[in-house]
Amino acid sequence: METKTAVPIFINRRKYEVDERPMTGREILTVAGFAEGYDLLLLQGEGDPSGGQLILADQTVDIKPGLHFRAIPGNRTFGRN
């Protein structure tokens, strides 16, 4: 029988414990209580100057301890009127 190990990941700087297994972007957003309509970005550590890599809702991420993600509204219009 395979035993799953809970590992820490960070979403918008908050720590969450999840099983170390592949998860979809949708599943990761759900862990932090975000609904459809949010975009998920995989960061290269907190403070990633690149802004992160977009993870689609059905895209799979191999969960490893210490991954950092950012969830932002998908309908954002930063700086646009």
Image (cartoon, helix red, strand yellow):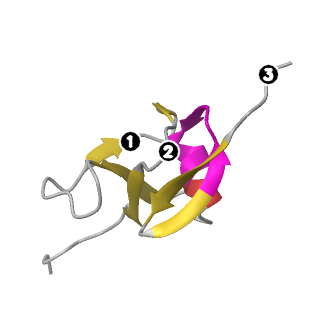
Return the disc, 3 or 1, that comes first in the chain's sequence: 3
Horizontally, is 4 left or right of 32 in the view? right
Front disc: 2 or 1? 2
> Which residue is denoted by mark 2 in the rendering?
65
Numbered range of the magenta stretch: 17-28
The amino acid type found where label 1 is placed reads: Ile
**Residue 35 appearing in the image:** no
The structure residue drawn at horizontal position 73% and vertical position 33%, both measured from the top left corner, is: 4
Residue 35 lies left or right of residue 44; in this view the side is: right
Q: Which residue is mark 1?
A: 55
Relative to 66, residue 32 above or below: below
The local crowd at label 1, few if under 14, some if 14 to 19, many if 20 or more residues have their Cα within 10 Å, is: some
Left or right of residue 57: residue 39: left
Tell me which residue sits at (55%, 53%) in the image.
Answer: 8
Give coordinates of residue 21: x percent, y percent: 61, 31
In the rendered image, residue 45 lying in the magenta stretch gets the answer no
Farthest right residue in view: 1
Pointer 2 and pointer 1: residues touching (CB < 8 Å)? no
The kind of residue on which mark 2 rests is Pro
